[in-house]
Image (spheres, grey):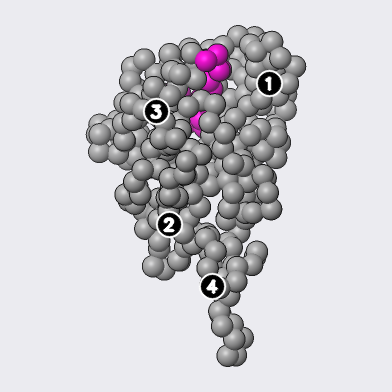
Amino acid sequence: MDSKDCGMYFPEVKKNPDKYLQRCPESVKKWLKQLKSAGKILLLITSSHSDYCRLLCEHIIGNDFEEYFDVVITNALKPGFFSHTPNQRPFRTLENDEEQEALLSLDKPGWYSQGNVIQLYELLKKMTGKLDPKVVYFGDSMHSDIFPARHYSNWETVFILEELLGDKVTVPAETESEPLEKKGKYEGDEPKAPYFVSKQWGSFFMDRLPGLENAEETLVRTWSCKCISTYSTIAIPSLEAIADLPLDYRFTRFSSNSSAIAGYYPSPPRALLPNEESVTMK
């Protein structure tokens, strides 16, 4: 964000944050605190500059937002953060939101700018005392978050996919094997859907291909849908959807079986559920 308030976007957001930003639900803030109390290391990695990140986080989470995270990395310039080497993208400290000289290594928790996943992972080894610490990475961009985190770092990835709301997530009936306290926010009621299937483009998950001559049209999964099951461990509509679950809740992964819908939580989008028409992979 330009400190001189140049342009139209940043000054407007800064002037009217309530108009453009949604507050973080209390359930999510509680969940973050529970993770830290359980000994988990929490990272915030964003391509936004430090001043814009601070503006958003103070409004969304609160002035104490830094207490929720052990490491904050701004101007990460993802996806390059995952693919570049330390020589190409070293970490830098910040002073009054201005980047300082490059660091040779990342030695302690804190707020940094730019950087690379190689040196971050070395820091995580030091902080956890483990040779191979496991990382679960949450993101809402396949291009900048999910694909590079899985492809370059082999991290577990949780895709936050708002289209799950628009495609009318269906909620499975209660089963005796899952008591009420094991259920997430959306497993009692079907969520309200602020996003709708595009009348022009159709479903985010499925395409309809016209048949040749008199043949019936065929339903095929979209390229985006294929990427979800390939590079995501699970996909959820929001953090709020899982915030009320116990920390030891066991999710079904996309790789758990041959099904391409196994990793959607709380349930696959309706467009992907089996029906009378055949569904093939595009």
Q: Which residue is mark 4?
A: 276
Q: Which residue is mark 1?
A: 133
Q: Amino acid at mark 2?
A: Asp
Does the stretch in magenta take in 163? no
Q: Amino acid at mark 4?
A: Glu
Q: Which residues are magenta?
A: 38-51
Secondary structure at badge 2 equals loop
Q: Which residue is mark 2?
A: 167
Closer to the N terminus: mark 3 or mark 2? 3
Q: Amino acid at mark 1?
A: Pro
In the image, 56 versus 233, the foreground residue is 233
Is the residue marked by circle 1 packed among few (<14), some (14-19), or many (20+) residues within 10 Å?
Answer: some
Closer to the observer: label 3 or label 4? Answer: 4
Secondary structure at badge 1 equals loop
Distance of mark 2 from mark 4, alpha carbons? 19 Å
Distance of mark 1 from mark 4, alpha carbons? 45 Å
